[in-house]
Amino acid sequence: MNITTTARHYDLAPSLKDYAETKVQSLKKYFDHIVNAHVIFSLEKYRQRVEITLHVNGKDFVTLQESEDMYLSVDRAVEKLEEQLKRYSGKLKRRKKATGLGEVSGNVVEEE
């Protein structure tokens, strides 16, 4: 998984960058096919915003969180993405389990 970070309107501290990257890496346990992640940090007066975009095979997951603490914003954004990924992987599993319209489920009893 490629992780890119962008900081808008301020200099990004290396500790915050490492923290965010480890949190985003932890999302791998919920869904294996994450292609890349883009983390955007922005600072506007008292609002500290974190936007995380995950690109998964053919689908994008985006979350935006803001608070007065950048670390708290990262935590909340990762929690939101965890929920989205769990829901998406469950959806894929249900779709895979479902039988198609043309298939017959169960045993066929033959009469003589």
Image (spheres, grey):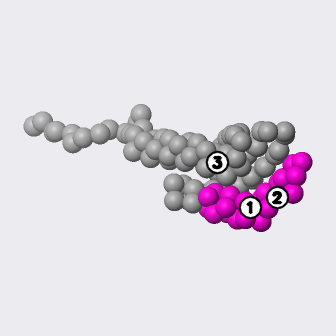
Residue corresponding to mark 2: 12
Disc 2 marks which amino acid? Leu
Q: Are marks 1 and 2 in contact (CB under 8 Å)?
A: yes
Does residue 3 show up? no
Separation of marks 3 and 1 at Cα, in angstroms: 14 Å
Residue 15 occupies which quadrant of the picture? bottom right
Disc 3 marks which amino acid? Leu
Residue corresponding to mark 3: 72
Residue 11 part of the magenta-drawn span:
yes
Residue 77 occupies which quadrant of the picture? top right
Q: Position of residue 88 (x, y in %)?
A: 53, 43
Mark 3 surroundings within 10 Å by alpha-carbon count, few (fewer than 14), some (14 through 19), many (20 or more): some
Residue corresponding to mark 1: 17
What quarter of the picture does the N terminus occupy?
bottom right
Q: Are marks 2 and 3 in contact (CB under 8 Å)?
A: no
Q: Position of residue 19 (x, y in %)?
A: 67, 61
Magenta-tinted stretch: 1-25
- Residue at 16% x, 39% y is 110
Does dot 1 land on a helix, a strand or a loop?
helix
